[in-house]
Image: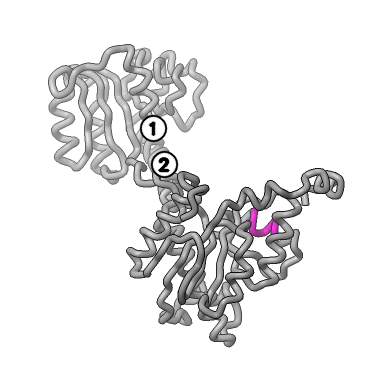
Amino acid sequence: MHSDNKGWILEKIAKRLMENLEKLGKSVEIVSEPTGHTDVVFWLYFGHSGIIQHGSSSEFQFRSALVTHVDDALKLKKVRELDKAGIDLVFMSKSHSEHISEMVRRDQIFFHVLPGTDLVHLIKPMKVGIFSKVFIDGRKNENWLIKLVEVTDPSQFEFIIVGKGWNKIVSKLRRLGSKVSLFDDIENPYPEYADFPELYNSLDLFIYLGFDEGSMGALDAFVLGTNLLVSRQGFHMEFELDDSQLFSDYAEFEERFTQQLNRYVIQQRHRQEWSWENFSKSLLDHWELEAFNRTEPRIASQSSYLHSSAHRHEIDLKVRLIFVWRAGWRFLKIRVVNWIKRTFVKHRY
């Protein structure tokens, strides 16, 4: 690994790719220069000056490079050179791959794979907050939570409850599989009011079930910009909320809550797609497909091959990857910037 890239995002990409490909049974090395026989060489930066030179070696069966920012004419020229030399170029978005493919007048769109993030593992169930004391007469409609949990998947959300009198309800919720954090000065200390903003900001949804003028907790949540689902009455009406954030009875509350939950779950599933596991698996599938296509010309198209499980073959290719990069920024900085401005004054490329 070249010292100039220590700590850069390219180093993280290389390490995460290596970790996940090894989990898939592949042998992986991170080096500064490709050496020895290997099935796949993957350059972490397409600006490396030795890609084409190393690419001509018979020791490397498949040559691939990651393309990040193509934001000037010299980088575009580099893409053309690598493509012409038969280097497999991997982009990090569909939009970028389509745009650059058009710029270099390529018949087929370059392959792209979405990057991953370490934070994807921090994704949690929807946090639902309730800041309210409950009374013996049930005026806060707290039993609605029991009915709600019985008809939903409690693993998809958790309750943060601040207030006294919740012991019996919380016990029932937990028996039904709900995760509940209770701040009632018994199970957990009641938070200081100064700590409320941080607590509100940690919520995905604040709910208030009572119909007794309005909730000061709901007012705080509204002022702090917390997502709300509250009763259609009192000063809640002055919040000027969307109708989907208000309810008049239990049936409407359940409907509105389910809509909020489904929307949250869909968003979370999409966020979870941005993992290093998916990034690595997509790259491996691509490399195996390309290697298969180069040895099996009868495969008509990449698209039909990818999407037809009936024609999917197990690839015997034993991929051993070498990630290679050098100080690519040096390669770019020595170019004549004035020439770029003069020649491409009307276009970026």
Spot occupied by residue 182 in the image (x, y as percentages of width and height): 20, 26
- Write down the residue under mark 1: 204
Render colour scheme: one colour
Does 319 appear above or below 113? Answer: below
In percent of width and height, residue 32 lies at 49, 60
Q: Quadrant of residue 127?
A: top left
Q: Which mark is residue 222?
A: none
Q: Where residue 307 sits: x, y (%)? A: 51, 72
Q: Which mark is residue 264?
A: 2
Query: Sequence order check: which comes first, mark 1 or mark 2?
Result: 1
Q: Residue 278, percent across and down? A: 43, 58
Instruction: Decide which of 53, 294 is in the foreground and name it.
Output: 53
Q: Inspect the image, locate mark 2, and give the three-letter code of the amino acid beneath it.
A: Tyr
Image height of 221 relative to 62, above or below:
above
- On screen, residue 137 above or below 48: above
Give the main secondary structure, helix, strand or loop, of the magenta stretch: helix
**Magenta-colored span:** 96-100
Q: Residues within 10 Å of mark 1 (few under 14, many from 20)?
A: some
